[in-house]
Image (cartoon, rainbow, N blue to C red):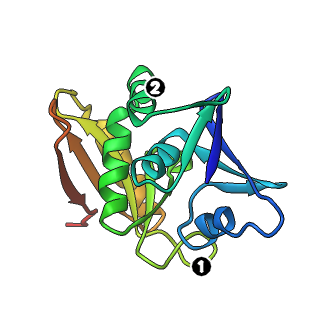
């Protein structure tokens, strides 16, 4: 399947009779469909390229996985991709968590937007980052306020990930 990269978005034309882009969206919850296109974020597209499910072209030049990884690194979102890939490989359905102040919201396998509510919000923190306790409290408060668990993904310099499940408790 062919995707075209432009302005950090990969678009896949949905041709008449073509079910693969629609299945990517409906079954696996990748991207969003508008008009006759499936639009993928750079992170989603990189994941699909790495899995051999998508070929990506920019100005009719075939993009390699290393080219997309370089784009992710230039935008300082490679760690976000590493966490996305790890969670996707674990079977989660992943959507943006932007409106909750987090990187992702997670749905268990088989779920997704419109089918059920997400179970987790994922906040990515770098191992060397000094976190302000008030910021941390706000992450926990928001997740609790929307009935979700907070999954804190700590990424170290080697891009290894340690997850912490953070829950609100009332003494």
Q: Quadrant of residue 136?
A: top left
> Residue 1: x and y, percent?
61, 54
Which residue is located at x 24 percent, y 58 percent?
166
Which residue is located at x 53 percent, y 51 percent?
54
> Residue 145: x and y, percent?
45, 61
Question: Separation of disc 2 and disc 1 at Cα?
Answer: 33 Å
Which residue is located at x 44 percent, y 27 percent?
67
Which residue is located at x 41 percent, y 36 percent?
65
Query: How many neighbours does mark 1 have within 10 angstroms: few (below 14), some (14-19), or many (20 or more)?
Result: few
- Circle 1 sits on which residue? 115
Of the numbered discs 2 and 1, the one sitting upstream in the chain is 2
Q: In the displayed structure, would residue 111 be above or below residue 70?
A: below
Query: How many neighbours does mark 2 have within 10 angstroms: few (below 14), some (14-19), or many (20 or more)?
Result: some
Left or right? Give the position of 163 relative to 142.
Answer: left
Check the image and name the residue furthest to the top.
Answer: 74
Q: Secondary structure at mark 1?
A: loop
Left or right? Give the position of 140 relative to 161.
Answer: right
């Amino acid at each position: 399947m062919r995707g075209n990269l432009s302005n950090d978005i990969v678009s896949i034309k949905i041709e008449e009779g073509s079910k693969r882009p629609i299945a990517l969206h409906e079954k696996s919850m990748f991207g969003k469909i508008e008009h006759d296109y499936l639009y993928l974020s750079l992170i989603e597209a990189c994941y699909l390229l790495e899995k051999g499910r998508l070929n990506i072209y920019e100005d009719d030049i075939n993009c390699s996985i290393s080219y997309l990884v370089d784009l992710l690194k230039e935008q300082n979102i490679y760690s976000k991709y590493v966490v996305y890939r790890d969670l996707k490989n674990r079977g989660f359905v992943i959507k943006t968590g932007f409106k909750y102040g987090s990187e992702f919201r997670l749905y268990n396998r088989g779920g997704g937007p419109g089918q059920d509510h997400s179970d987790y919000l994922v906040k990515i923190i770098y191992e060397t980052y000094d976190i302000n306790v008030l910021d941390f409290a706000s992450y926990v408060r928001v997740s609790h306020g929307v009935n979700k668990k907070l999954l804190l993904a700590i990424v170290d310099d080697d891009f290894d990930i340690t997850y912490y499940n953070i829950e609100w408790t009332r003494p």
